[in-house]
Amino acid sequence: MARAAVSGRLTWRVAELAEATDITKSARGLVFDVPGWPGHLPGQHVDVRLTAEDGYSVQRSYSISSAPDGERFELSVQRVADGEVSPYLCDVLSPGDRIELRGPVGGWFVWRSADQAPVTLVAGGSGIAPLMAMIRTRAAEGSRVPFRLIYSVRTPEDVYYADELRRRAREDAGLDVHLVYTRQAPEGSPEPPKRLGLATLNTHGWPADFAPNVFVCGPTGFVETVSDIFVALGHDPRRVRTERFG
Amino acid sequence: MSDDHVDGNALAGDLREIFAVDLTVATGQCSGCGYRGSVATLRVYQNAPGIVARCPHCEEVVLRLVRGRDRAWLDLRGTVSLEIPLPSP
């Protein structure tokens, strides 16, 4: 893929914000254009660096949430109230503004469409970002690999890409989407709010016998709990890939 | 279960600044317990002056990386070896 064109060491690039949209009340989708962007694999991330006038510099990693699309890609950024970087990216950065970033990086938490094994995706909150890139890439490439997404959110308002996921669950053949609400379920929901547990992962993920690729992304505690359950359910630990964002 | 760490995926950018290939897909062996696993699965603590990566099995420090203004220090004394996938020539 395009990644083969990448060679040598990684350096910082200038990225221009092309579009910004609200994904939820507290998350923004930021679409960047980067001249000479080499393309990415779904699941990869970029490092963003902000530098103040006095030279103070701070760096954060954000997963790419879009399918490969030339020199353009989307990051989804959850606003962290006392954060150093996300309030700037969500509330200050405007189309036409430029920031420094480097990437794409990370080759381990990556779905490769040539791999025909079924896929179970488990997201906690904003951990949906790299999994969304996988879902979108699967559709863009016309892949038939069966995907199951289990997505844990606090309330219905916290669902990233809610309309798109609803549409894809209907239209993308072979994609199942199951939402778990931990604090407040939508009206008329058959289940009360609850934490994601063994029964849900067992029912809505692929069984270990199918040797699926499992991708789990979310807060550290969430990822550890979910990956431990998959291993307890008999999944090969090497096929349970995780990404923690603290 | 603690939330103060991330994982080795977060090392990708800092290591690719130094090395020509992605080291997070390399398999490392811990000098403390002999555990072998992907660098991406290490426990990474970023709230230090540098970055500290620990073995997910025994918590031995296997990698430390400090970035200065014009140089980096990489301490691998906790790592016996790294097996690095490369394309066939």
Image (cartoon, coloured by chain):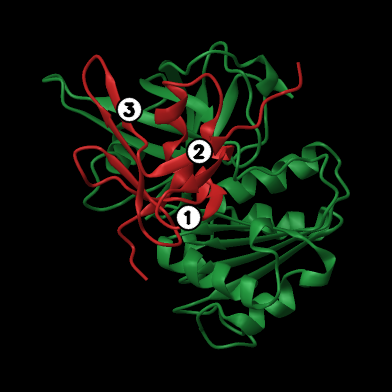
Chain colours: A green, B red
Front of the two marks 2 and 1 = 2
- Residue A85 horizontal/vertical position (percent): 28, 39
Q: Do the residues marked 3 and 1 share a common chain? A: yes
Protein chain holding label 3? A
Real-space Cα separation, disc 3 to disc 1, in angstroms: 20 Å
- Circles 2 and 3, Cβ within 8 Å, touching? The answer is no
Q: Quadrant of residue B5?
A: bottom left
Q: Residue at x 62, y 37 (%)?
A: A66
- Residue A215 horizontal/vertical position (percent): 63, 56
Q: Residue at x 41, y 19 (%)?
A: A96
How would you rate the neighbour count of disc 2 (Cα within 10 Å): few for under 14, some for 14-19, many for 20 or more?
A: some
- Residue B12 horizontal/vertical position (percent): 47, 34
Q: Secondary structure at mark 3?
A: strand
Q: Which residue in the structure is indicated by mark 1?
A: A126
Protein chain holding label 2? B
- Circles 3 and 1, Cβ within 8 Å, touching? The answer is no
Considering only vertical position in the picture, is A196 above or below A23?
below
Instruction: Compare residues A40 and B73 and report the one nearer the observer.
Output: B73
How would you rate the neighbour count of disc 1 (Cα within 10 Å): few for under 14, some for 14-19, many for 20 or more?
A: many
Q: Which residue in the structure is indicated by mark 3?
A: A49
